[in-house]
Amino acid sequence: MKKISILSQRNNYSIVISKNLFKKKSFFYPLIYTRNIVVITDTNIARLYLKKIKSFFLKLCFKYQHIILSSGEHKKSFNTVKKIISILLKHQCNRNTILIAIGGGVIGDLSGFVASIYQRGIPIIQIPTTLLSQVDSSIGGKTGINHLFGKNMIGSFYHPIAVGIDPTFLYTLPKKEIFSGLSEVIKYGITLNLKFFYWLEKNIKKIINLETKTLQNCIYKCCKLKSEIISKDIYDLKTRMILNFGHTYGHAIENFVGYGNWSHGQAISAGMMISIYLSKYFSNIDNFTIKRIQNILIKAKLPIHGPKNMSPEDYINLIKYDKKQNDIDSGFTEIIIRSIGKSTIKKNIETSFIRSAIQQCHIQN
Ligand SMILES: NC(=O)c1ccc[n+]([C@@H]2O[C@H](COP(=O)([O-])OP(=O)(O)OC[C@H]3O[C@@H](n4cnc5c(N)ncnc54)[C@H](O)[C@@H]3O)[C@@H](O)[C@H]2O)c1
């Protein structure tokens, strides 16, 4: 079992990484004792795990209920939020209730948002079950739902009271979701840590094959890197923005193709490549470095180009809604890399650079 502490202004809490979490009363008991719990999950998790999860919680908590949603990005909507809130109200859930989100980033983001607004905030425990959610979305308190104009346009910063990561959940995760999660894993190497990037180059196959020790190590390293960044900048005003590397274009791609048609990880992978071409204008990134990054993404079965029918203007129209773009008249704000493992925030980037980076990335198609 490994533990990482997160320091947030609202509360300090732990990320626990452990096999067989649902046999570990010591993790849950102090958190849920005498409380009513509501598990929020999706149909895939429910089919595979709910029986075990329910019988575990029934022995521990005061009152147990669950809400099962169909899976998919489209669930991150106001409609689902209203539906969940109505169920919570119907069951007279109050501030003695704890939500337990068990699922991927969709369940985590959505449940976190509900927890943040229901009766002005009730506690939530995140139990991520996809690689992406274990290394990224369950950590850091960003919650949200989508809007027609963009991804995660409605949301809050709301930290869980604990995060429990059980890597064995990944044994049932479809391979394409493992690849999707690898995109955020590789992002940590590219933006924050050259040593981790080297380690990934060596170990990517073992991670894809879910070799227990390597997988656990990978999850731990990612959580550690993310926790260090967010402890410095909880509200995403400075350093934390670096974690959005490639996301400006990735979110535009997700919106353009229709939510759920490209996985989040696929879109971020193609988005990172555009950011890398953009970085070339402002740093000494050479073609060898670009090739190296492309190679690791290809090994992880991730795309290195956006959709063929998406023009630079399509990107530019969509990225205006990106949350980093506070002063669009003075140019775009973007995360660029100086070299592998070193990144920075660059402001006032002219549209012509963005257009050219997208074109360069397309030319490689
Ligand atoms: N809050 C953040 O900081 C943050 C960061 C990155 C991404 N995100 C968000 O995360 C979302 C993507 O999350 P995701 O990639 O986890 O996708 P997801 O939640 O849609 O899950 C992918 C699929 O895997 C299934 N699944 C989940 N766990 C499983 C398991 N153990 N076994 C079998 N099937 C399983 C789900 O039912 C779903 O069909 C996006 O909405 C993205 O915006 C949020």
Image: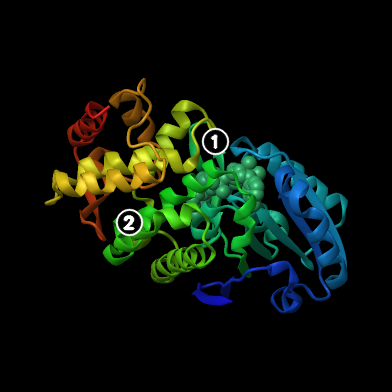
Q: Residue furthest top?
A: 309
Q: Is residue 329 left or right of residue 145?
A: left
Residue at x-position 61% and y-position 35%: 74
Upstream in sequence: badge 1 or badge 2: 1
Tell me the CA gap for discs 1 and 2. Answer: 37 Å
Q: Nearer the viewer, residue 134 or 35?
A: 134
Q: How many marks?
A: 2
Q: Residue 252 versus residue 89: which sits nearer the camera? A: 252
Residue neighbourhood size for the residue with mark 1, other residues' Cα within 10 Å, grouped as few (<14), some (14–19), many (≥20): some
Q: Residue 56, located in which quarter of the rendered image?
A: bottom right
Within the image, what quadrant is residue 250 found in? Answer: top left
Place of residue 239 in the rendered image (x, y in percent of width and height, measured from the top left): 33, 62
**Residue 118 horizontal side relative to residue 300, left or right:** right
Identify the secondary structure beneath mark 1: strand
Residue 354 visible here: yes
Q: Which residue is mark 2?
A: 201
Q: Nearer the viewer, residue 171 or 182?
A: 171
Identify residue type, mark 1: His
Q: Residue at x 75, y 50 (%)?
A: 48
Using the image as rendered, state which of residue 131 and residue 5 is in the foreground. Answer: 131
Percent across and percent down for residue 262 are 49, 33
Q: Amino acid at mark 2?
A: Glu
**Label 1: which residue?**
147
Q: Residue at image x 55%, y 33%?
A: 260
